[in-house]
Image: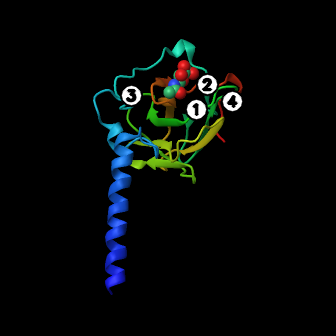
Amino acid sequence: MYWQLQNCCGFAIVACALVLLSATHAFPDGAPADTCVKSRTNEPNHGAARSQSLAALPYQVTASGSAYGPGSQIQVTIHGHQDVFRGFFLQARDAQTNEWIGSWYETPNTKTIPECSSITHADNRDKEQATFVWQAPKDRQGQVYFTGTIVKNYSTYWASVIAAVPAASGRHL
Ligand SMILES: *[C@@H]1O[C@H](CO)[C@@H](O)[C@H](O)[C@H]1NC(C)=O
C-alpha cells in the first residue's frame, strides 16, 4: 500500500515536470488546442520570432484537390526536399465561409484538434515529408483549402501557408 502511494506521488511529480517542460520547450508535442482561437491565428507562440517570408518557403505543400463531396477524402502533403521541418499546424477551411470543416485521420506521429479541424505534430523530430488525409463532413459539399504553419526550428517558421492544388489533381480520392 505504502509503495503504491509512493509510486503514485512519483507519477504526479513526473507529470508535473512534463507539463513544465512542454510549457518552456516550444511544444514538442504539437500546437496546443488554443492555437485555434488566439488573435494571431496560425502563428505559433514562439517568443519574439515572427513568420518568415512565404516567398522563401523551402517546403512544398500540396493538396490532392479542393472540391469535396459528402465524406470524400483529400490528401495533403508537406514535402521538405532538402529541408527538414519539425512541426506543423494545418487547418481545413471551407473556401466560401472560411469556417473550420471536416476532420483529419490521426496517426501515431500526428495529433488532431477536432474542435477546429486541425492537425499538428506529435513529436519534434526532423521530418522530410508528412502526408495527411482529410475527410469531408458526411452531409456537405463545397470547396476546401488547407492553411497553417510549418516550423523548421523554434525561431524559424512560416505561417499562413496555403496548400497548392496541382492542376492535374482536382478530383476526389
Ligand atoms: C533555424 O533555422 C535557420 C534556417 O535554416 C538557421 O539559420 C538557424 O541557425 C536555425 N536555428 C537553430 C537554433 O537551429
Closer to the observer: label 4 or label 2?
Answer: 2
Q: CA distance from mark 1 to mark 2?
A: 9 Å
Q: Does the image show residue 162?
A: no
Q: CA distance from mark 4 to mark 2?
A: 19 Å
* Residue linked to disc 3: 43
Instruction: Please name whichever residue, 99 or 67, is drawn nearer the observer in this view of the structure.
Output: 99
Q: CA distance from mark 3 to mark 1?
A: 16 Å
Image coordinates of residue 101 in percent, x first then y, are 43, 40
Q: Amino acid at mark 3?
A: Glu
Residue sitting at x 28%, y 28%: 39
Classify 10 Å Cα crowding around label 1: few (below 14), some (14-19), many (20 and above): many
* Residue linked to disc 1: 85
* Residue linked to disc 4: 169
Q: Amino acid at mark 1?
A: Phe
Q: Secondary structure at mark 3?
A: loop
Image coordinates of residue 85 in percent, x first then y, are 58, 32
The residue furthest bottom is 1
Closer to the observer: label 1 or label 2?
Answer: 1
Residue sitting at x 33%, y 87%: 1
The quarter in which the C terminus is drawn is top right
Q: Secondary structure at mark 2?
A: loop
In this view, 64 is above or below 138? above
- First reached walking from the N terminus: tag 3 or tag 1: 3
Closer to the observer: label 3 or label 4?
Answer: 3
- First reached walking from the N terminus: tag 4 or tag 2: 2
Q: CA distance from mark 3 to mark 4?
A: 29 Å
Closer to the observer: label 4 or label 1?
Answer: 1
Q: Amino acid at mark 2?
A: Tyr
- First reached walking from the N terminus: tag 4 or tag 1: 1
Disc 1 to disc 2: CB gap under 8 Å? yes
Image coordinates of residue 35 in percent, x first then y, are 35, 37
- First reached walking from the N terminus: tag 3 or tag 4: 3
